[in-house]
Image (cartoon, rainbow, N blue to C red):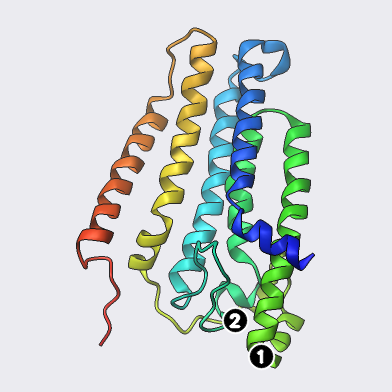
């Protein structure tokens, strides 16, 4: 299981691609033939799509909260190797051991729900947990070897993914918007672009032009924000942490 986890950790970008491709095909099937989608043309269709977006945004908020309070060289998007200079045990990490993966789950759950296929959504949930079960096993082996009893004591009282809010401990670090902007700009832009792409492709399949203007504006803004932040990250020191 550990060797499988290491391989999946290095290639964990595969899961989003699978969800996106399969989900997009099922979504277009719904849009091309109303018999596959009971909410098509009803007043509830827009509300359902909004709820899907809110589920995904919940996942992004979880990631932002986690990253903002986490210590440096932890809670990153690295794929080449495990990195943890310190063990995060406070803040959201005092309620569950893998908040970033919970955030990822909700981000992609909203997209899976957008397809309108119950069985695809159910299959995604099952596949996600089987997929990340091995990654979590590998990460926890790494943390156990590096931090020893400190990790074991924390893990023994902290759930893997289902949070125990009663055990919340205030984080030591101040919230860092700079770290969030550096690390989460990709997720914000990708999320809105995917929802925009689904909206545009769905209307094209139906040969309509009734696009969700609010969603398209949000998507365009997310791209602009991404480009600005990327420029600031690599060409200025505005997003670097102050070290005094």
State the separation of the CA atoms marked 2 and 1: 10 Å
Which residue occupies 30% across, 75% down? Answer: 241
Crowdedness of circle 1 by 10 Å Cα count: few (<14), some, many (20+)?
few
Quadrant of the rendering where the N terminus is positioned: bottom right
The x and y percentages for residue 46 are 54, 26
Figure check: 90 above or below 118: below
Which residue occupies 72% across, 42% down? Answer: 124
Which residue occupies 64% across, 44% down? Answer: 109
**Local SS, label 2:** loop
Crowdedness of circle 2 by 10 Å Cα count: few (<14), some, many (20+)?
many
Between residues 103 and 15, which one lies in front from this camera angle?
15
Between residues 174 and 228, which one lies in front from this camera angle?
228
Between residues 66 and 127, which one lies in front from this camera angle?
127
The x and y percentages for residue 165 are 66, 72
The residue where tag 2 is placed is 89
**Local SS, label 1:** helix
Q: Quadrant of residue 88?
A: bottom right
Between residues 177 and 16, which one lies in front from this camera angle?
16
Q: Quadrant of residue 19?
A: top right
Circles 2 and 1: CB atoms closer than 8 Å: yes
The x and y percentages for residue 209 are 42, 12
Q: Earlier in the sequence, mark 2 or mark 1?
A: 2
Residue that extends furthest to the left in the rendered view of this protein? 236
Which residue occupies 59% across, 40% down? Answer: 17
Figure check: 14 above or below 135: above
Quadrant of the rendering where the C terminus is positioned: bottom left
Q: Give me the disc on residue 74.
A: none
236 horizontally vs 9: left or right = left
Q: Give me the disc on residue 150.
A: 1
Figure check: 229 above or below 120: below
Q: Quadrant of residue 37?
A: top right
Figure check: 86 above or below 234: below
């Amino acid at each position: 299981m550990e060797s499988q986890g290491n391989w999946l950790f290095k290639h964990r970008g595969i899961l989003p691609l699978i969800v996106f491709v399969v989900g997009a095909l099922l979504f277009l099937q719904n849009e091309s033939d109303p018999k596959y989608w009971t909410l098509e043309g009803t007043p509830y269709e827009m509300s359902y799509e909004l709820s899907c977006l809110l589920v995904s945004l919940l996942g992004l908020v979880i990631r932002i909260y986690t990253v903002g309070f986490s210590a440096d060289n932890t809670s990153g998007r690295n794929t080449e190797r495990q990195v943890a200079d310190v063990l995060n045990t406070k803040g959201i990490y005092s309620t569950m051991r893998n908040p970033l993966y919970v955030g990822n789950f909700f981000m992609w759950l909203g997209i899976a729900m957008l397809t309108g296929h119950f069985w695809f959504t159910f299959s995604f949930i099952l596949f996600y947990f089987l997929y990340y079960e091995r990654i979590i096993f590998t990460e926890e082996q790494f943390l156990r070897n590096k931090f020893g009893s400190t990790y074991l004591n924390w893990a023994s009282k902290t759930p893997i993914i289902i949070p125990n809010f009663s055990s919340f401990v205030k984080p030591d670090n101040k919230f860092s918007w700079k770290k969030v902007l550096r690390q989460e700009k990709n997720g914000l832009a990708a999320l809105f672009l995917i929802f925009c792409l689904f909206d545009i492709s769905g209307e094209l399949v139906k040969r309509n032009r009734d696009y969700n203007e609010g969603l398209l504006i949000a998507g365009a803004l997310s791209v602009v924000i991404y480009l600005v932040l990327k420029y600031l990250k690599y060409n200025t020191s505005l997003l670097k942490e102050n070290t005094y």
